Amino acid sequence: MIGSKEVVLKANEMVFQEGDQSKNLYFIKRGVVRIFKKKGAGAIEIETIRAGQILGELAFFDNQPRSASAEALTQVELVEISKVALDDAIAKVPEWFSALVKSITARLRTTTNRLRALESVSTDYEVDKFGNRSREFTYVNT
């Protein structure tokens, strides 16, 4: 397919970083990728993506920065799909299908942003005996 290429990553190599601008989405042929967000000195695990699944679609479709990072947990074989390749494929599907993808993407981005806002009001920092904030987060249960 024009505009796509195969990529092989070793375990612990990054597919992309949170905040990066999207140029591609990825189809996993083999391997496992973790999706996570950085939080203080640690990370919040969001999902594990496996062979046969797509990743990086949210930022790819709505032209916003990546909302999370993706890291290979095993050796991973990916098909990197460019906008040119996707536009070529979309040109061959009905108009309603393109509208469906855009609608789902917009709703998912809205949900991601709402969760981020809720998360920011439901966190707190641990404080040591000297009153210094640590980098660890304690999630407040409501």
Image (cartoon, rainbow, N blue to C red):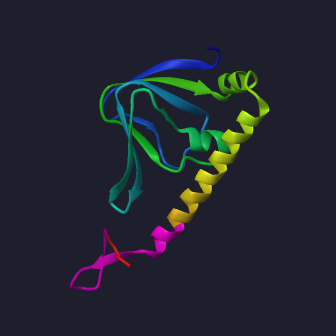
Location of the C terminus (image quadrant): bottom left
Q: Magenta segment, which residues?
A: 117-137
Q: Residue furthest right?
A: 95
Residue 21: in sight, yes or no?
no
Seen in the picture, residue 91 relative to 46 is either above or below; the reply is above
The magenta stretch spans residue 123 = yes
Residue 104 x/y as whole percent: 63, 46
Horizontal placement of 62 versus 139: left or right? right
Q: Quadrant of residue 102?
A: top right
Nearest the viewer among 10 and 98 is 98
Residue 7 vs 107, above or below: the answer is above
* Whether residue 81 can be seen here: yes
The N terminus, quarter of image: top right
Q: Which residue: 36% across, 63% down? A: 40
Residue sitting farthest toward the top: 1
Quick check: is 85 in the magenta stretch? no
Q: Is residue 56 left or right of residue 29?
A: right
Tell me the quarter of the picture where residue 101 sits: top right
Q: Residue at x 45, y 45 (%)?
A: 69
Side (left or right) of 94 relative to 58: right
- In the rendered image of this protein, does residue 110 appear above or below residue 29? below
Residue 6, position as x, y percentages in the image:
49, 18
Percent position (x, y) of residue 68? Answer: 48, 49
Rendered position, 11 above or below 30: below
Residue 76 image position (x, y, % from top left)? 37, 26
Q: Residue at x 49, y 27 (%)?
A: 27
Q: Single out the residue that lies furthest toward the bottom.
A: 130
